Amino acid sequence: RAARNGDVAVRGYAPSMGQIFLRRFQLVTHFRQALDTGQVEVHFQPKIALRDREVIGVEALVRWSHPEFGRLDPDEFVPAVEATGLVDALTCFVMERALEQVRGWLDRGLRLSAAVNLSVRNLADEDFPDVVAEALGRTGVPPELLTFELTESGVMADPERALPVLRRLHALGVVLAVDDFGTGYSSLAYLRQLPVDEVKIDKSFVFGMGSDLSDMAVVRSIIELGHSLGLAVVAEGVEEDAVRDQLVGMGCDTAQGYLISRPLPPDRFEAWLRARTVRARGSRDRLVLTL
Ligand code: C2E
Ligand code: MG
Ligand code: MG
Ligand code: MG
């Protein structure tokens, strides 16, 4: 990946600390401009209810195509951006695109939610809940159609600051989800004290559950724990039919993964909805995945 994207990559050698630092510095210095010049986009990956295959919403995921560096991996540039104040601009950019999209669906009679990933810095920003309230008010999107995904490590970095922000977000009525669950501190007692509604099982456990009994046991226990705390449970990284079937059997609520769809740019997401779902008319219209 470094060799494809980077002008500082040295083929065949692990990059030195200096090279990593330089690369991060380049990424961050280019990011502000990237936001303003259309290099940054938001893609959407569907989430489905395992019970009845209804498409219930999307996760909004940032994408950056740089004219020289090419397509950059969020796992590389998001942490670099997160280390700076620019992450506020990233979060707002993604949230605006997500709300715009949800608004568009509502205008067509579709009730789909969108999930936006937060960084540790957003959780330390006491003005952030006001920014969210303003955006919801302006777009007229009901708060329950906006989800924020946060990681355990993001909350644990500074719980004293994160908790009041989380409480205020929750009071707005937005949905809060713990992302990558199982990879962090996994303090079960702590999870009980967070104002969260949903846990997302990390994809590393979901990938393996078809063949690895210990991964299957971890997934099963997260589902049971989540349900016993009254939380909805989402599995990310669902790539195989067999895994989806196991998750259905374990009573997992929601699935997201390449089996259903990769993250797609907005126009291709609309085409996916048209091709892969049927509209079930009822008290409210629902989109259900075809077989
Ligand atoms: P995440 O929030 O855990 O997002 C899920 C990641 O898993 C996404 O990678 C998605 O494309 C990938 N994924 C989903 N289903 C499958 C599957 O079946 N197989 C495989 N192999 N992968 C699957 P992506 O888009 O590369 O993002 C990576 C991480 O970057 C995200 O992990 C999140 O931590 C961060 N990120 C992405 N967009 C944003 C953003 O807008 N803001 C912030 N703060 N972080 C973001
Ligand atoms: Mg996420
Ligand atoms: Mg995740
Ligand atoms: Mg992740």
Image: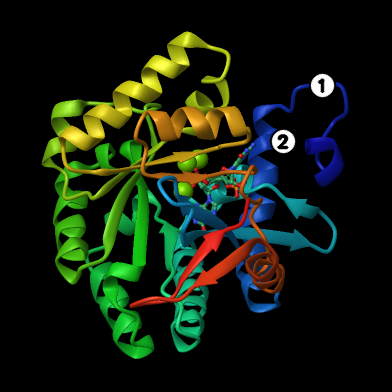
Q: Is residue 270 above or below residue 5?
A: below
Name the amino acid, label 1. Tyr
Some atom of ligand 1 lies within 8 Å of the CB belonging to the residue at label 1:
no
Q: For numbered disc 2, what is the local secondary structure?
A: helix
Q: For numbered disc 1, what is the local secondary structure?
A: loop
Q: Quadrant of the N terminus?
A: top right
x then y, percent, for residue 61:
56, 57
Name the amino acid, label 2. Gln
Badge 2: residue crowd in 10 Å (few <14, some 14–19, many ≥20): some
Circles 1, 2 touching at the beta carbon (< 8 Å): no
User: What is the number of the mark on residue 19?
Assistant: 2
* Residue name at image x 25 percent, y 28 percent: 224
x then y, percent, for residue 181:
37, 33
Q: Is residue 103 above or below residue 257?
A: below
x then y, percent, for residue 177:
32, 49
Mark 1 or mark 2, earlier in chain: 1
* Residue name at image x 35 percent, y 81 percent: 141
Task: Name the foreground residue: 146 vs 169.
Answer: 146
x then y, percent, for residue 170:
19, 61
Q: Quadrant of residue 66?
A: bottom right
Write down the residue under mark 1: 13
Inter-mark Cα distance, 1 to 2 = 11 Å
Task: Identify the image's colour scheme: rainbow, by chain, secondary structure or one colour.
Answer: rainbow
* Residue name at image x 81 percent, y 46 percent: 5
Task: Name the foreground residue: 48 vs 51.
Answer: 51
Q: Quadrant of residue 226?
A: top left
